[in-house]
Image (cartoon, rainbow, N blue to C red):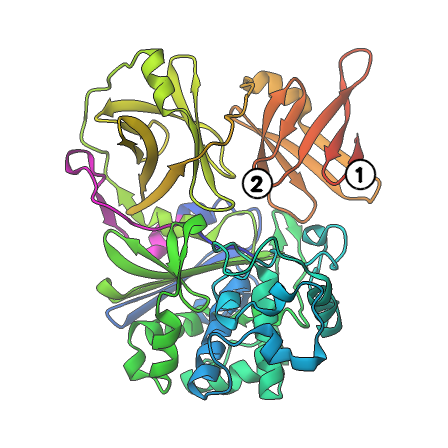
Amino acid sequence: MTGNPFRALAAIVASAALVHAEKPLAEAAAPLAKELPAGCMVTGESVGGKRSFAVLGKAEPEGVAAEKRVFEIGSISKVFTGLLLADAVLEKKVRLDSTLKEVLGKKQDFADPRVGEITLLQLATHTGGLPRLPDNMGPNPDAEKDPYAKYDRKDMRAFLAKAKLAGPPPYPASYSNFGMGLLGDLLADLSGKTWEATVKEKITGPLGMRDTVESLSAEQTKRLAPPYQGAIRGTSWTFQAMAGAGALRSTAADMVKFGEALLEPEKTPKPAMIRSMLEARAPYADMGAEIGLGIIIGKLDGGKEYIHSGGTGGYRSVLQVLPGKKLVRVVLINNDAIPAENVMAAAREDAKPAALPEEKLPEAELEAFTGVYEMGPTARFTVLRREAALWVRLTGQPFAPVVFIGKDRFRYTVVPAELQFQREDGKVSSLVLHQNGREIPAKRSEAELPVILFAKEAELKAYAGEYEMTSGQIFTITVNGDSLMAQLTGQPPVVVFQTKKGYFEYDVVKAALEFEKDGDGKVTGLVLHQNGEHRARRK
């Protein structure tokens, strides 16, 4: 289950600003839908109250209207958990600063008293210091077909009892499925009902969202778009205690209706609850934004944006609300091969920036910009010099070249985006990425610049193939241009970077792949270095 980074900050350099036009979401989705190996995309838009829907790709089952097709919406469920917290506070059942120790009372022990001091607000804003997932879900829950199915309240409370923090909360916001799942379970327990029943009573019932549920009826099951992971049929996810983190299913019609409620809370039966959820509560540096009660709050082209994405085993989704434009956009995909956010980005037709002369800087001057620039706890830009040019990566992305266009500003050559470096006392101290109407800042850190061995596509192809682990999981290694991609069963492909000959490191987690060769130099297997060594044999 995923999130999505962005935020707009200071003024753009006017002479180099990127300009854009917009096109309908369905039009933007059409070419991307053709890339899906299976499944379809459904788009929904509300522009000034006028709704439109479309389905593109290989839609199944047949005969179901675009807006009525049911999809898992994953982490968008967190927004509903945030609304439940807002409602419980308004009803004076809890406070935003109520602590776990207060809410759980004598029913819960804490090995670390600081865990007991985490507040409900900190759970809703990912600032409690809890991990993305607890360590008692199994050795590799991300690779499970239905990872949350067996995790119950007993497991959740057992993890809380032993969890330890490095210091007292709050922490810088860092995405935690566990924290939001815990919040949902606490609020359900408080209501004396299940999380699903509480959502129906407090949110979907009053808003008339009849197709937004955790458990499908027989009729809704007939409208469910089946999950796919690439060309392979996936598995629907089920939840127990962690329902508040990602259990909901919905339709484009319901999600557009929900977005309209966020646009105009006063027109709903629950205006105070919605307004409270939408209030910015904490900075979210990893996403270049702020966060309300479960909702990401950023800026797009200078205007406010409410947004959240979702991803389960065979689904991708995103909800975007732009109050200044009275615009709601929804993308639902029953395949994990393409992020739903890509469709949103494709709806922006970024004009080719004004031609500015490319300037050459001496290598010594380029060195002034190299370094690691941190957005937040888990997101960073790495800027290094490759021969006579700067190359940049954002966590989870390949390196890309940038060219100097003057006044400490560089332009990407592969996408319409620019980097504005900033100085303090003459020394480069930070940068701002300008892309897709957003401005993402990052501060220069003291982290050591990694050594990257850039290889050509032909050399990387020697590693491509499938590698089977003793657990039966498969590593699929592919080449995308000059980047090596690694995908473990049940997970999306991730770029890895060569730091030693045949040794490739991840930058999204602390892990590495070391390839093994036989006497003839042929690649025969790999070793995953992550919490020990795990071997895989080439098929």
Question: Height in image: 230 above or below 146?
Answer: above
Label 1 Cα neighbours within 10 Å, binned few <14 / some 14-19 / many ≥20: some
Front tag of 2 and 1: 2
Q: Secondary structure at mark 2?
A: loop
Instruction: Mark 2 and mark 1 in contact? Answer it, CB < 8 Å.
Output: no
Q: Secondary structure at mark 1?
A: strand
Question: Height in image: 145 above or below 434?
Answer: below
Residue visible at 53% across and 66% down in the picture = 123
In percent of width and height, residue 242 lies at 64, 68
Residue visible at 40% across and 51% down in the picture = 343
Residue 471 in view (yes/no)? yes
Q: Is residue 130 magenta?
A: no
Q: Amino acid at mark 1?
A: Met
Quadrant of the image for the C terminus? top right
On the rendered structure, is 349 left or right of 502? left
Q: Which residue is mark 2?
A: 508
Question: Height in image: 174 above or below 279?
Answer: above
Q: Amino acid at mark 2?
A: Val
